[in-house]
Image (spheres, helix red, strand yellow):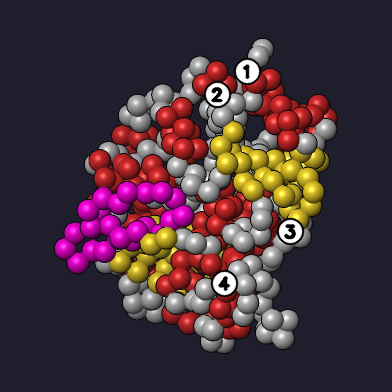
Amino acid sequence: MSRDGAKRPEGSAGPEAGATLAFVESPVQLLNVLEWAYADAGGPSPEQAAGGAPGDRPSPSAPEGLGAAGLGAAGLGAAGLTVVVLSPHDPMTRGQLRRMAELARDEGITVRWEDARGGAGAPLKTIGGLRGPLRRAGRIVIGDPFSRYVQLLLTLTRAQDLVVVDDGTATMEFVSQLASGEPLVRWHRRGTGRGAREMVFAPVSATARRRLTPGGDRRVEVFSSMPVEPPAGVTVTANSFAWTRARFGPPRLTRGTDLVGTSLVETGVVDPERYLEAVAALARTHGATRYFAHRRESTEKLHRVAAEIGLEIVRPDLPLELIARRGPIGHTIVSFPSTVVHTLPLALSGTGVKVAVCDVDPAWLRSDASPRAQGFLSGVTGTARDAHRLRSVPAATTS
């Protein structure tokens, strides 16, 4: 039993030879593994699953789970998929991961929870326990190619099929770096990436990068809802959030507008005061009353959003795509450049909800933000195909 009280399923020592092993570290990654498994299993469209119009709820007489959606009683677990959760420290992330793990188990998937960061000896224990399953797996699915933990695990596998599912907008950067032959470095990371730790880890990162490059019998797939241009040999499969739409909703819409929070302050990209000014201006302009907090937002910042701006703080226990699909949700959702400006229009297709994205003014950036930050954020906004673009928030640009 893990520290989170989740009992490991029988046979959780690892998958059978040739089966699929997935590694996730965030709720969104686990959601996208479910979406990939649904698409890989040939799951029906949301319209077929519902037996009606897009967004219609499945028949009340149908049992819960994807067995009712045409995949059989075993659901998504029929293909021998095991999901390994490499649990982080953050309590909000762990909480959402526990809820997502419950949904995965409901769909017949084996979930193995690892307290991979639970102490000095935890990484060695985790890697040792996964060595056998990694050797036996025929296909590996990962949610974060930038993760050092995942990169280390990739050096231990012999699998010839590798799948990268969305970890938000980072997928765009991963595909770009893979195509250009650059080292795998997160877009908001400051500095040259040549510090002592980076130099020590460089051989592992280079090996993992080679594993993620197609060649010979090695096949690489990217499962994404993001606008990406794949390098030669990489297959891109579109994530339409078919599982989410078949499983949840349609939501009840409120008359108000909801704002979506971001961790741009916490990652050192945006100045906190500028961010709060922007949130206040958006709330005034669009009549927003609720603020959906990102799981990494600080308690202090959220307190100021509530106390100074007067917004109701909502801390979701699941990824926002599922929360919005279950409802109730505002008729308009306003966000800064982030993953949700790409994913929410897909998850909420057919519901009538409008998603709008507000540009990040260069004046909001911290002086020590990564030089790539503005270009990357502009790209996130500019490539959001089904989101309305809000070009400026006048009150947020004044001191």
Q: Which mark is residue 46?
A: 4
**Residue type marked 1:** Thr
Residue highlighted by disc 1:
397
In which image quadrant can residue 358 be found?
A: top right
Decide which of 113, 247 is in the foreground and name it.
Answer: 247
Measured in 3D between alpha carbons, the distance from the residue under mark 4 to the one under mark 2, in whole angstroms, is: 38 Å
| Residue sitting at x 72%, y 86% | 61
Residue highlighted by disc 3:
327
Q: Which residues are magenta?
A: 213-236
State if disc 3 and disc 2 touch (CB < 8 Å): no
SS label for mark 4? helix
Are there few (<14), some (14-19), or many (20+) residues within 10 Å of tag 3?
some
Residue highlighted by disc 2:
361
State if disc 1 and disc 2 touch (CB < 8 Å): yes
**Residue type marked 4:** Pro
Q: Earlier in the sequence, mark 3 or mark 4?
A: 4
Q: Is residue 296 above or below residue 101?
A: above
Magenta segment, principal secondary structure?
A: loop
